[in-house]
Amino acid sequence: VSKGKSIRPDRLIFYSDKVAVLDYKTGVEKESHKTQINTYAKALINMGYDCVEKFILYTETEKLLRVDLP
């Protein structure tokens, strides 16, 4: 993420040893959703968080997708 650009993940959950990023989506799965959550994860890693888990929750189907490392 470049300087001056704001990003806003839907939810961050902080644990003692990791942080989880959760993004809520409607509609169907898209590759751009994974790209977006990976951007959030990279920003957190740049901030010094070593262990970042990524999840996308599709609200209409209630499907929870765990996004692996790119």
Image (cartoon, rainbow, N blue to C red):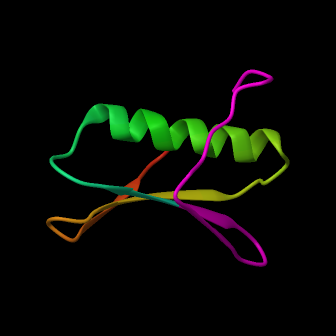
Looking at the picture, tell me which residue is in the foreground, 65 or 33. Answer: 33
Q: Is residue 22 visible?
A: yes
Q: Is residue 23 left or right of residue 15?
A: left
Q: Is residue 29 left or right of residue 14?
A: left
Percent position (x, y) of residue 4?
A: 78, 24
Percent position (x, y) of residue 55?
A: 43, 59
Identify the image quadrant of the N terminus: top right
Identify which residue is drawn at 71% across, 67% down.
18
Q: Is residue 69 magenta?
A: no
The residue range painted magenta reads 1-21
Identify which residue is drawn at 76% across, 53% down.
50
Q: Is residue 70 visible?
A: no
Is the residue 21 above or below the residue 1 in the image?
below
Q: Is residue 9 left or right of residue 62?
A: right
Q: Is residue 28 left or right of residue 45?
A: left
Count of numbered circles on the image = 0
Q: Residue furthest right?
A: 48
Looking at the picture, tell me which residue is in the foreground, 59 or 48. Answer: 59
Q: Is residue 10 magenta?
A: yes
By secondary structure, the bulk of the magenta-drawn segment is best described as: loop
Quarter residue 31 falls in:
top left
Q: Residue furthest bottom?
A: 16
Is the residue 61 above or below the residue 48 in the image?
below
Looking at the picture, tell me which residue is in the foreground, 19 or 9. Answer: 9
Quarter residue 43 falls in:
top right
Percent position (x, y) of residue 45?
A: 74, 44
Percent position (x, y) of residue 58?
A: 25, 60
Looking at the picture, tell me which residue is in the foreground, 53 or 39. Answer: 39
